[in-house]
Image: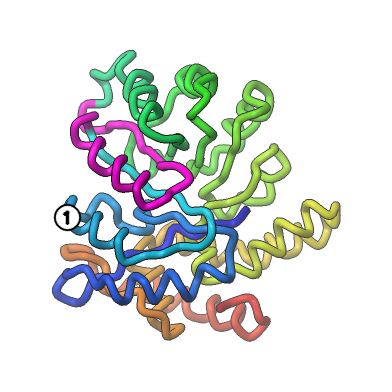
């Protein structure tokens, strides 16, 4: 499966644009296997509770979708979890509490186990954003819970993927790191939840299909071709992703202030985007 973490559109004043959100989701959904709403690329941490609810009400996905949950405590998480369940999400994608993470101890496992009683969930390991590593021992413990379905690992550390394959064979693993997608697939990942899939959904689905068909040389060539797109987007984050989508005529809106409306990486990114578009890989 290839799922994009769709951006949440804000206008230039930082106001949520629910109509643009629905339009963007409807444009992307037919091209992918499902959606992630309010992931890192969806600026889930930048929304008020009221905005989260309003945005979810605006969307009517037909394909499976996940909802990101990036809270710090169980009371904060309960409302978001309930809204995701009522919206019909197949699961929540949950980052670890991070502000006082060194004090968590066994509370980390307890946090995920408590949330899993409310609905199925995936663990979300994204240390470049949270500055927190999910301990592998905790992942192994949590994988035994019947409602903890798997993990999205965006760290790009293939040794962690090797651990999942060796120790958690029934655990569903998705990578969030586009530059190492092929390596992740070789280590048993089911697919990718990739910001770059917002721009090149057919390319990443083709890479997945060619790998599954055993056409490894073809898959390697496509991974090399896509590497600059994924690498630059990992550096540029939400401002670069939204700028690229606006350039392509999609209603991605702008990052919420104080984050900049445009990325300094755009002059390097635009030729990569245009070349891939000429080759038929971009939206």
Nearer to me, 238 or 70: 70
Residue corresponding to mark 1: 50
In x, y percent, where is residue 74? 24, 29
Q: Residue at x 55, y 38 (%)?
A: 157
**How many callouts does the rendering have?**
1
Secondary structure at numbered mark 1: helix
In x, y percent, where is residue 31? 58, 70
Range of the magenta residues? 73-100
Q: Residue at x 63, y 49 (%)?
A: 191
Residue 150 left/right relative to 204: left
In x, y percent, where is residue 94? 38, 38
Q: Is residue 74 magenta?
A: yes
Nearer to me, 9 or 83: 83
Nearer to me, 72 or 81: 81
In x, y percent, where is residue 63? 53, 59
Q: Image height check: is 82 above or below 263?
A: above
Q: How crowded is mark 1: few (under 14 residues within 10 Å), some or many (20 or more)?
A: few
Q: Image height check: is 150 above or below 64?
A: above
């Amino acid at each position: 499966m290839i799922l994009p973490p769709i951006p949440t559109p804000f206008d230039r004043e930082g106001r949520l644009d629910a109509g643009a959100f629905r339009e963007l989701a409807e444009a992307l959904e037919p091209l992918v296997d499902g959606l992630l709403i309010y992931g890192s690329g969806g600026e889930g941490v930048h929304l008020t509770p009221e905005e989260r609810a309003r945005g979810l009400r605006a969307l009517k996905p037909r394909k499976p979708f996940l909802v990101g949950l990036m809270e710090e405590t169980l009371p904060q998480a309960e409302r978001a979890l309930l809204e995701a369940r009522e919206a019909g999400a197949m699961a929540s994608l949950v980052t670890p509490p991070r502000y006082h993470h060194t004090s968590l101890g066994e509370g980390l496992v307890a946090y995920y186990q408590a949330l899993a009683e409310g609905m199925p969930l995936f663990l979300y390991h994204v240390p470049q954003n949270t500055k927190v590593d999910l301990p592998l021992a905790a992942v192994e413990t949590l994988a035994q819970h019947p409602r903890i379905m798997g993990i999205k690992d965006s760290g790009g550390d293939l040794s962690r993927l090797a651990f999942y394959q060796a120790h958690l064979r029934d655990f569903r693993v998705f990578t969030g790191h586009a530059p190492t997608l092929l390596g992740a697939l070789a280590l048993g990942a089911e697919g990718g939840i990739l910001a770059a899939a917002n721009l090149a959904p057919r390319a990443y689905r083709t890479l997945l299909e060619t790998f599954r068909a055993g056409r490894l040389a073809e898959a390697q060539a496509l991974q090399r071709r896509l590497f600059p797109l994924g690498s630059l987007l990992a550096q540029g984050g939400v401002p670069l992703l939204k700028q690229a989508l606006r350039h392509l005529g999609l209603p991605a809106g702008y990052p919420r202030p104080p984050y900049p409306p445009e990325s300094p990486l755009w002059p390097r990114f635009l030729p990569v985007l245009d070349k891939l578009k000429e080759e038929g890989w971009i939206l």
